[in-house]
Image (cartoon, helix red, strand yellow):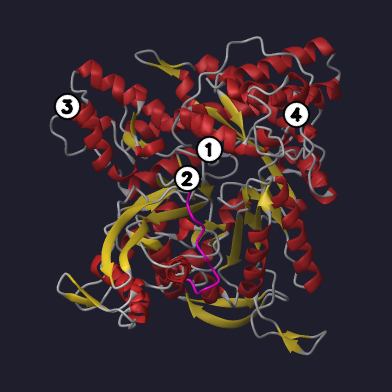
Amino acid sequence: MEDALIAPAASLPQQPAPAKPRLVLSENALTVLRKRYLKKDPQGKPLETPERMFRRVAHHIARAERNYGADERRVAEIEEAFYDFMTSFRFLPNSPTLMNAGRRLGQLAACFVLPVEDSMEGIFDALRNAALIHKSGGGTGFSFSRLRPKNSNVGSTGGVASGPVSFMKIFNTATEQVKQGGTRRGANMAILRVDHPDILEFIHCKSSGRELNNFNISVAVTDAFMRAAASGEDYDLLDPRDRRAVARLNAAEVYAALVSQAWKTGDPGIIFLDRMNADNPTPELGEIESTNPCGEQPLLPMEACNLGSINLARFVRPGAGIDWEGLRETVALAVRFLDDTIDMSRYPLPEITAMVQGNRKVGLGVMGFADLLFELGVPYDSEEALQTAESVMGFIQKTAHAASEALAEERGVFPNWERSLYGKRGLKRRNATLTTIAPTGTLSIIAGCSSGIEPLFALSFVRRVMDNDRLLEVNPVFERTARERGFYSAELMDRIAREGSIRNMEEIPADVRRVFVTAHDISPEWHVRMQAAFQKHTDNAVSKTVNLPRQATVDDVRRVYDLAFELGCKGVTIYRDGSKENQVLSVGAAPGAPPGGVLERPETLFGFTTKIKTGYGHLYVTVTELDGRPFEVFATIGKSGRSTTAKTEAIGRLVSLALRSGVTVDKIVDQLKGICGEHPIFQNGGLVLSIPDAIARVLENRYLTKEGKPRIAKTEHSLSGEKCPECGQKVSFEEGCLICHFCGYNKCS
């Protein structure tokens, strides 16, 4: 591994040196750790190794044991246990804990929900609080359902209200300016009740693909609405200020609009509000009205939750089944770790500190489930896989509850226990909730396992490295099986990387093809059924994406939403392949965006260079491409004066700016083509009038049809139809987020 990551001794925290061998990490894991997790100096150079990072976290969290009477020997034992189960990748806490534990910021939670009150003061208080949370590394969920509808009277000014969607845009703009912990922009969830008068505007608010790109949006539907939609009945829209009916809509038509927009863009998702509140352990403290950005953590206003995930791949061995005893020990230790994390976290607001410490909610989840199924020889889309999911999550749930009961005996119940459902039933608990299936995108890269409960995104894929070298990476369980069964070859693995699936490759044994399915081999029904299987044994909710092929219909989406409701899910998110195409490319701009919203440039782009003869000498036009579309133009002219050279460079820069601002190539060609210069010249049977005319010819020949219309870009689609804006690799849409499995880039909106 890289000794370059080792910092000078003087710059390291004075903590016990790791006694164990250095970690074995993949190149992808090292990339993610360097970019997003390791402590750095002002120049961005890592000041700690991965081992030091895990030691920092273990040391800091274990200090909470002192609060409960542990002596230094016991604290050291707990620290070593924490260090060991993180560095063996049996468990990892959420990203803010890895980033901030033992450091100045000290904020360790990932999930927050903030109230948005119906007043200018309340709205901008929420905006300020969200900025503080994003700066500390957390994501925020909001319900905008309390805000008065658009065009309502505002008594204090005599004006009219602009409505929830207008304020969402202000929140989105603010998010652009605040990076999470200095590493990435924040993520938000916006929720609106289905009975809010502005519900149709909300459903369509992301339809352009150019607005609210820092928000996931979900419609909060009630059981009564779902029944009305099924029967085609009308329902009331209610003024949130007094719950007075102000209009009526047809529930089936609203539901159809919701489903249609989800088919087009992936938004909005849907949450089943009554179901979430039925599992609210502290209803006396308030109603659940929103979730965190990926939907798996319902929270009360001003509440936060610390999350962590167990790597199921570490608890199964070929031919030996699941290591239940090892899993039991890890679950119990993980509950202790997460409870200690609450004590050691510095929350951004005193109101949040009070709510978190009052309820002590934690969310223990899983990752590596697809890997576990591979090792067991169980297809993801099978009844046996559903039974495995219920067995594993049921065991984790039962063990976590028992661990919380044991902590309650040792440390006391959570302070709001008497006002909770547990208190009324006489069930001792240290934590109001214990389990959550959260996204594990970057964590799963570090741990070297599959994400959350998602199926694998690819069995084999190509990673481009320096100098455009291609590095083939193959899932280790599949590679081992291929070698043992005698069908492994580099050529076959390369073909699998290109095609994305093995289901039609007859040279691979049928039983292997049946087990090693990937996300788009699996029908939407099985995605939903798997989510529902985990939800049965999860206190909070489940983050999962139902992947749909590009040719899926609106009716297919509706069937997903109906099935999720029928099977008891608390919400559902769908992604139709390619429906978010190009939204990942930048924050705040997308192809077709007006000038001023300029796409950020990835570090590496590929393209072509064309030499064309002009009256000023040979012109060299280099065009870089992003997803098959022109992104930049560089123009240089040989053997000409400085003035011509400067003008040529200026034209290239302006064309590049236009392309990155969303101006289409046909409009650029239309502006440049036909401009006459002093020295026109014939070239390949055509007259080149000037340098701008020559640039137009290059673009026209490459990107326009004979009729002058843009050609359909021949895009190399991944399972999600996207490429990473930071490293140019393929990305996948999982757990409600776009995730790059190479550099760790993720965008949860």
Determine the CA span between mark 1 and mark 2. Answer: 8 Å
Horizontal and vertical percent for residue 533? 44, 39
Residue annotated with mark 2: 739
Callout 2 secondary element: strand
Task: Tell me which label, 3 or 4, sits earlier in the chain.
Answer: 4
> What range of the chain is rendered magenta?
593-603
Of residue 235 and residue 707, the one placed in the foreground of this image is 707
State whether residue 292 is above or below residue 262: above
Query: Residue 340 — which label?
Result: 4
Determine the CA span between mark 4 and mark 1. Answer: 23 Å
Horizontal and vertical percent for residue 57? 70, 27
Query: Residue 442 — which label?
Result: 1
Task: Tell me which label, 1 or 3, sits earlier in the chain.
Answer: 1
Residue annotated with mark 3: 509
Determine the CA span between mark 3 and mark 4. Answer: 49 Å
Callout 4 secondary element: helix
Which amino acid, by three-letter code, is at mark 4?
Asp
State whether residue 437 is above or below residue 10: below
Task: Tell me which label, 3 or 2, sits earlier in the chain.
Answer: 3
Which amino acid, by three-letter code, is at mark 2?
Ile
Residue at 65% over, 67% down: 144
Determine the CA span between mark 1 and mark 3. Answer: 33 Å
State whether residue 159 is above or below residue 636: below
Of residue 715 and residue 452, the one placed in the foreground of this image is 715
Residue at 58% over, 59% down: 214
Query: Residue 567 — which label?
Result: none
597 is within the stretch colored magenta = yes
Determine the CA span between mark 2 and mark 4. Answer: 29 Å
Instruction: Choose mark 4 or mark 1, whichever is in front.
Output: 1
